Amino acid sequence: MNIKIENLSFAYGDNKILENIDIIIQSGETVGIVGVSGGGKSTLLKLISGLYEVQKGSITIDDACISALRRKYVAMVMQSALLFPASIRENISCGHEMEEAALLHACNTAQITEWISALPDGIDTYVGERGGQVSGGQAQRIAIARAVAKNASVILLDEPTSALDGDTGMAVMTALAGLTKGKTVLHVSHQEKMLTGYDRILRLEGGRLYVP
């Protein structure tokens, strides 16, 4: 699915974060955006995903410009995985009925099948408040499994490995490769090396997008 952003501006009160952003991301294209922490990268993703309402300009995913409609097409993996105080199964399915084959596919793609099978309660293991009973890497891979299960056409990645150590981060990157295959991808990071292999890399600086 195409993403079309026109004349997008956003501010927190008097603090301008984004200014006159224009970009078209073609269906199946992978785009990386690099920029300093606090420079508006996460805000841009939250606007695209419909978590924030557009203040000025427009964002369209195919023909959907309303936030509630855009959310259906988007899956997002953030720097810190947001898990519900529920089981692994419920965190992947978001409480919806899901066939075991679909759950297994999501777990396999996120590379958590072996870990889950070693747990006493398996996929019905409780993750704790805010995922406190699982490690950061495990939590990220549960979030990736959730995104796989949603089968969204657009994948938004917000520095998904920056809070993880080297080995865990590499394992999560491998899982992300399975998630993003054949999808339209927008990945933001403050490290350009994390965006190697993307079709395009842009820089977000001073609220504006540039070609580095």
Image: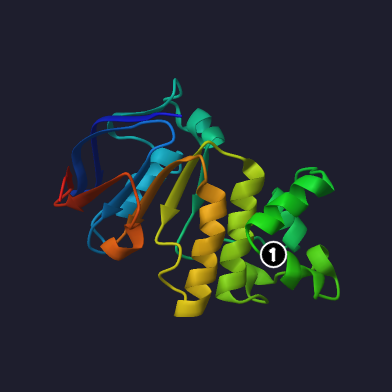
| Residue at position x 63%, y 75% in the image | 132
- Residue 6 horizontal/vertical position (percent): 25, 28
Left or right: residue 155 versus residue 108 is: left
Q: Residues within 10 Å of mark 1 (few under 14, many from 20)?
A: some
Q: Nearer the viewer, residue 113 or 51?
A: 113
- Residue 16 horizontal/vertical position (percent): 18, 48
Residue ID for mark 1: 85
In which image quadrant can residue 8 be found?
top left
When the figure is inspected, residue 4 is found, relative to residue 42, above or below; the finding is: above
Left or right: residue 23 versus residue 205 is: right
| Residue at position x 72%, y 49% in the image | 93
Left or right: residue 73 versus residue 97 is: left
Secondary-structure class at tag 1: loop
Q: Nearer the viewer, residue 68 or 149?
A: 149
When the figure is inspected, residue 122 is found, relative to residue 135, above or below; the finding is: above
| Residue at position x 52%, y 28% in the image | 69
- Which amino acid type corresponds to the residue marked 1 in the rendered image? Pro
In which image quadrant can residue 108 be found?
bottom right
